[in-house]
Amino acid sequence: MSQFWADLKASTDPGLLGVVRFLGLLYGPIEHNLPIDQAWRKALSYRLPAFVGWRHALGGVTYLLFVVLVVTGVLLSFYYRPSVQEAYPSIQHIVSEMPFGWLVRDLHMWSANLIIVAMLAHMARVFFSGTYKPPRETNWLVGLLLLLVALAFGGTGYLLPWDQWAYWTVTEVLQTMSRTPLLGIVPAVLQGDVIVSGATLSRFFAVHVIILPWVAFALLLFHFTLLRKHRIAPPPGGDPDPTNGVPFYPNHLLRSFIVGVVVLAVVFSLAALYPRPLGDPANPFELPAELVSSWIPVDVSLALIRYLGVWGFWLFTLLGISLALLPLFDRRPERRLRKRPVMLVLGLVFFAGFLVAWFAGRQLRSLPPGARLRTEASERFVPPDTAPEGVRRSPTPERSGTGEVEP
Ligand code: HEM
């Protein structure tokens, strides 16, 4: 080994060797005061229970997708401009002129979709194995907040391309929220104008790139700290690992690496094969002929409303909320699934229902705008001086829309 280093030293450029020595001089005192090497070795030799297997990789997959979202999101933010005049052209610039800009954008878009699937799969694993029960109920609730944060990330990011599909879908969602008890606070805070406009875009952007990342980091830290405290739950009915467990490296790291490579291969392939097209630039005075969805929660909502009606949509949402709040009520220590038939049925209805709705929603991806949006769009044509009392005035173009359309 020492011969190898001697040969390497002899064949290395002296300038480069100088830089390495200099870095070594800097690193020495740092390592002395802050033993990074020791901490690194300790982390790698951390022992996990022997029962930790492939199904426990789902949390890691979610984390990996989160990292992809952060990296691609930071790259996009170098070129994206959050204003009515520049948002759409800046996305066009990213996808058609920046090297691999199209790939970065579609990796971001696909990871935003897959993270919802990964989170629900992770949640289903935790739900069916009953590991949401004490003492892990706080971590279940922290996980739920993470799910809400992921939905908020997707919802605020949805508007940013500022094309017709984004504009009118967000208009419809905000309108529905404003008519729903408790949810009305969201448009009240985020819309910032009588209609979706430049003010809305600025707010969505600020929430998407400043507020939510900090909240997500804090929640992730909390999630992992609690996980470390309670350790991973043993299988239902099984004993906690009687052995001393297995080291994180190489046992679990190798498994995580394989899963990570597969996930990255899937995301890259989807991004390369199925890019999200850009609609026409947003125009607040003209409805598009169809609304094309690009995010799983929108697909699911479309299918639920189309096939089960608005009541069906709210019933399904209520089922999701009650499952989410379950740990507050279901505190019996029993975790075996066959002893929890009600949970089994409720869980199957929700998770399988979500999958079915997702696939059905994909068939409905391009739909003509609904009646409410058509009414809303036709109201916007009323010229300000002829508008009767109570009818919404057309907004001023510089505050709303593309800034190019005369009301
Ligand atoms: C960004 C989102 C999330 C990340 C990165 C994440 C990550 C992880 C990881 C790495 C684990 C340990 C391995 C495993 O059990 O898979 C874990 C465990 C856990 N997670 Fe999550 N998670 C997220 C969201 C959620 C959600 C949405 C829930 C439920 C609502 C949840 C509830 C739990 C619980 C209760 C445990 C402990 C499970 C046990 O001990 O068996 N997590 N999470």
Image: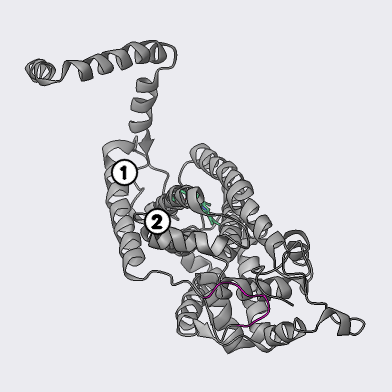
| Cα–Cα span, label 2 and label 1 | 29 Å
* SS for dot 1: helix
The spot of residue 251 in percent (x, y) is 27, 41
The spot of residue 392 in percent (x, y) is 83, 78
Quarter of the image for the N terminus: give it. Answer: top left
Mark nearer the N terminus (2 vs 1): 2
The magenta span reads 280-287
* SS for dot 2: helix
Q: Nearer the viewer, mark 2 or mark 1?
A: 2
Q: On screen, 19 above or below 116? A: above
Q: Residue at x 46, y 80 (%)?
A: 362
Crowd band around label 1 with a 10 angstrom C-alpha radius: few (<14), some (14–19), many (20+): many
Q: Does the magenta-highlighted stretch encompass residue 370? A: no
The spot of residue 333 in percent (x, y) is 56, 54
The answer to which of 367 and 227 lies nearer the viewer is 367
Mark linked to residue 179? none
Amino acid at the residue labelled 2:
Val
Q: Looking at the magenta stretch, what is its main secondary structure? A: loop
Residue indicated by mark 2: 104
Residue indicated by mark 1: 252
